[in-house]
Amino acid sequence: SSMGEIEMVFPPYNAEQLFTILKQRAELAFNQGVIEDGVISYCSALAAREHGDARRALDLLRVSGEIAEREGAERVTIEHVKKATLEIEEGRIYQSVVTLPLHQKLVLKKIVELVEGKGSTTTGEVYTAYSNMMRNLKYEPLSLRRISEIISQLDMMGLIISEVVNRGKYGITRIIKIRKDMLPVIKDALKDVEA
């Protein structure tokens, strides 16, 4: 039981603090001379710039070591850290997509199909494709307003890129794209979604 809640906010670590944490853990986890000079500095600078989270910085260093080991490298290099950054981001994107509610997955799947065909799509096109799919499945589709909110949420999560464009007399619409490097990851995460 508790009598009252006290909310504590911990500020993010800076690069120097992260360097100290990573250096200490690297000495325990890696053999002497396995980590190339500058790798810990690079990891701590990246982590400080992006989030300041020590656990995520440690994950970056760990995944870098795993990549070096998979490649049979004798030393962990900055190139391994760059590969680890991409691998971690892909894992984050995959988990984000897999845990989405059903209608968000369905909307994202329609966006992927439309974007693959021509590079970008619009809210109206997504809504039409989604509505047709729902009617074919004998379900009532969500409203255009709700689909627009879902598209905004997907954008905030970094799964899609959307930009509001004024088309003059044709009105305002949203142009929707997906980063080419993330498309395969998103498709893989959606492979079990029946649509």
Image: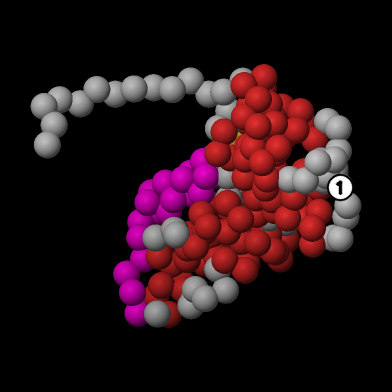
User: Where does the N terminus fall, quadrant-wise?
Assistant: top left
When the figure is inspected, residue 43 is found, relative to residue 139, above or below; the finding is above
| Of residues 42 and 102, the one drawn nearer to the viewer in this rendering | 42
| Residue 32 picture quarter | top right
When the figure is inspected, residue 6 is found, relative to residue 30, above or below; the finding is above
Mark 1, residue position: 75
| Residue 174 picture quarter | top right
| Residue positioned 55% across, 32% down in the render | 53
Q: Which residues are magenta?
A: 138-157
| Of residues 30 and 82, the one drawn nearer to the viewer in this rendering | 30
| Residue positioned 85% across, 40% down in the render | 33
Question: How far across and how far down the image is residue 106, in percent?
Answer: 47, 66
Question: How far across and how far down the image is residue 60, in percent?
Answer: 67, 43
Q: Amino acid at mark 1?
A: Arg
Residue 34 relative to residue 30: left or right: right
Question: How far across and how far down the image is residue 149, in percent?
Answer: 42, 46
Q: Is residue 153 magenta?
A: yes
Tell me the chief SS of the magenta region.
helix
Residue 178 relative to residue 139: left or right: right
* Tally of marks: 1
Q: Is residue 143 magenta?
A: yes
Q: How is the image coloured?
A: secondary structure
SS state under label 1: loop
Q: Residues within 10 Å of mark 1 (few under 14, many from 20)?
A: some
Q: Is residue 106 visible?
A: yes
When the figure is inspected, residue 140 is found, relative to residue 181, above or below; the finding is below
Question: How far across and how far down the image is residue 120, in percent?
Answer: 68, 54
| Residue positioned 77% across, 46% down in the render | 31
| Residue 57 picture quarter | top right
Residue 19 relative to residue 8: left or right: right
| Of residues 162 and 94, the one drawn nearer to the viewer in this rendering | 94
| Residue positioned 42% across, 80% down in the render | 136
